[in-house]
Amino acid sequence: MTPLLLAAALLTSGPVAAGPDAEASAPNPNAAPTAVALNVYPPAVHLSTARDRQSVIAVLTLSDGTTRDVTADAKFVAADDRFAKASVGEDGGFTYHPAADGVTSVTVTYEDQKVEVPLTVVESGVTPPVGFRNDVMPVFARSACNNGSCHGAARGKDGFRLSLFGFDPAGDHFRLTREQSGRRLNLGVPERSLIFEKSTGAVSHTGGKLFEPDSEYADLILSWIADGAKDDGADPATAPPACVSLDLYPPEFALTGEGTTQRMVAVATYADGTDRDVTHLVAFNTDNPITAPIDDAGVVTAGPVTGTGGAEAFITARFDVHTVGVPSIILPKNVQFEWPEDKTPANYIDEAIYSKLATLRIKPSELCTDAEFVRRAYLDLVGVVPPADATREFLENTDPSKRQALVDELLEKPAFADIWVMKWAELLTIRTDNNVLTGKEAVLYHRWLKEQIDGNVPVDQMVRELLASSGGTFDTPATNYYRTERDTLKTAENVAQVFMGMRIQCAQCHNHPFDRWTMDDYYGFASFFAQVSTKNSDDPRERIVYNRNSGSVKHPVTNKDVDPKFLGGEQPDFANDERFKGRDRREVLAEWLTSEENPYFARNIVNLVWAHFTGRGIVEPVDDVRISNPPANEALLDALAQRFIESGYDLKGLVRDICASRTYQLATRTNPTNVADTANFASAKLRRMRAEVMLDSINAVTDTSEKFRGLPLGSRAVEIADGNTSTYFLDTFGRAKRETVCSCEVRTDPNLAQALHLLNGSTVHDKVQRGKVVESLLKGEKGQDGAEDIPPMEPAEVLAEITARCLSREPTDAEKKALEEALAEGEEPKAVLEDYFWAVLNSREFLFNH
């Protein structure tokens, strides 16, 4: 358990130890917080060569879930002080420098907390030359010289261009040293080099002064120029070790009170096993500069926080090709908080949610009413409002487990599969297009997808069959996946976005600026699809998708073929490894993609499902997973993914878990602590129905039907197979056109056109008239095929029936009174009730899932 979650657990569970030797005691949330643990970062200090150094921070975790940077007040005592010398900065920062080779330890003490940190020094007498790849290039990145708004732009700036974020160091070296020889660099007088004079403000520079002439950055550049301005990576045999990972410390923190600070430390690890303090070389950023700004030195300062709950920020650091980040929480000072005793978790989902909320000092809303739950469950699980009889039966049921029973019942309805077929059809862009996908191919493809969902085929199995498919587009409908997109690079992008939630498009032209993906990663992943091809079949309407066993993808910088490489994983050896030799690259990829070796697949699927039931992904947008867009609740995402894997990728099991949680069943009504929360699921989100669900619900309550192209009369909008089949209503209310795999295609934001169509358009008015619901209820109906006659209803009963159909509740006193007053004035009941019916269908209460 991480420090913050441990502290949060103090507010929701039994007693825990306050320290390694302390006795357990029940926490008092309103008492002064006590120390729980002292952590020192990095957990081990390694110094190599005379130029190395390592800054160290001490972070105290308190019993209320907050942390405190106690570096300036802690005592650092080395067991043997011959090997490293410590320096203390003006701000209290603590840094070790090598003195002699050897191994010792440092004991860090703060009050009654104590931690021992190993310290190792090697090659203390060696002073390596300043390198272009690992020393100078990071200075350009930290100073934003190679950003997109500066020299990293496609055409550069002021006549000088660098590769964006340094994706092409060889090209950057050429442009610095050869493009304008003698101007940008002066080997004889390094101080007269243009890159030095502009950076230090000695001459006019559009970007302004970047650093002082006597700064460490200036010294690095001058030393490199004086040493001949070599590219130390030009010869692979003598190239310096590449940076393989970047760690940012502390891994999480929570500050209390405006003005409190937390130092950050960044450590790079290289291919030869060495590490290095690069805090002074990374580019820091924060996604919340008001609440948690961070300066160039890596110091986060708590900003103002309004209300009683905390604010969140994600702190990122970029170095070389690596971007990492850590979550942080900023809490107001002197705010008393006590977790409500009646808010106990129903399952593992609630445990993760409540733990985060307790740390943020946010209380969840109350549970929704039974009327709200039955309507919500029907809309989310089967895509239509519940029939009035089903609502009444549910409300009259006194079984305490009736909510779970309702979910189980709805999961077995064919309409549940229809909802998820529609959602997958959007992700797989099933739509007819000239010379791309014919009508028959689209129908067969959609039918195959429906068979998978209807049969509750494990999601991993369905995806493997889809990606590895070969054969005719009629006989093997899954092969149409390679008909909807034929471009190799675009196919790779779609696979990453749909099945891993990642938008890797940026890495096609340069290293991703906000994530870990490089151009090597992009083209290595695309290489899996380089051998897919199509040919004619005996039927001129059908195409054959096959693996031609040849073909490659070229890297645009090196112009060399790129071997396949799993995104974020290993590089399979198709030539020598028996596991891969002679196999279709797509088959190998599909196996890895859906395996536990790939950490992204299960997390992505559960995130998609979670977003459907809550209106917001744990990662939002759901298809924009990246370092700089962290999950709102990492523990929740991990728990859902692990349970999904353990269940055998069972979609229904996942849905059952989500619907059983108190979190799903929360009311949309907020309380003073969660009124401003939009990301932590402290209350249910008010969600406008998506276009297909809205149209199907209007048809259901008005007893009318639609005729869609290619489908029989009475088919539901969610059953439409072809993305090109639509209506004015569906287009107006944001139905996905399925032109791209982006989740943004489905639009549920209300707009003026929608309001005007409901008020003045033909859909609602005509359906109220054509369905004759009010007339039938007032007059009654003769039973058909032996069924009992339906007796006439009184106007008040019709009012109740309409309200139950549309809103799953009884009419309010105000609604009953309005009907009575209208009838008392002599108005005709049918006209009054039809007006009410029309008004209800135009109301936000009907149009929104709440």
Image (tube, helix red, strand yellow):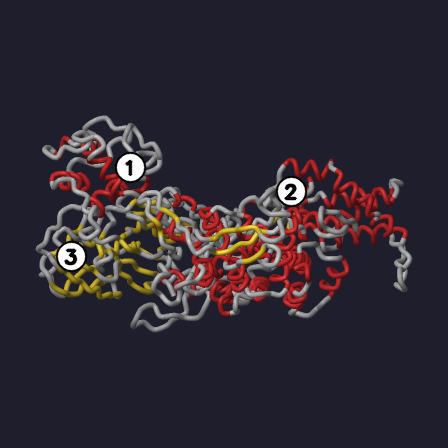
Q: Is residue 633 left or right of residue 652?
A: left
How many angstroms separate mark 3 from mark 2 (CA)?
A: 62 Å
Q: Secondary structure at mark 3?
A: strand
Identity of the residue drawn at 83% across and 49% down: 773
Q: Nearer the viewer, residue 216 or 38?
A: 216
- Residue 487 placement (x, y as % from top left): 48, 46
Residue 104 place in picture, x, y as percent:
15, 65
Residue 646 visible? yes
Quadrant in the picture for residue 178: top left
Seen from the viewer's position, the closer of residues 687 and 362 is 687
Question: CB under 8 Å between callouts 3 and 2?
Answer: no
Of circles 3 and 1, the one toward us is 1
The mark that comes first in sequence, 3 or 1, is 3
Res 367 → quadrant: bottom right
Give, as a three-letter code, the residue at label 2.
Answer: Phe
- Mark 2 or 1: in front is 1
- Mark sitting earlier along the chain (3/2): 3
Which residue is tagged 3?
A: 48
Alpha carbon distance from label 3 to label 1: 31 Å
Residue corresponding to mark 1: 162
The residue beneath circle 2 is: 733
Residue at image point 76% right, 57% down: 388
Q: Is residue 833 left or right of residue 577?
A: right
Is residue 358 visible in the rendered image? The answer is no
Q: Residue furthest top?
A: 204
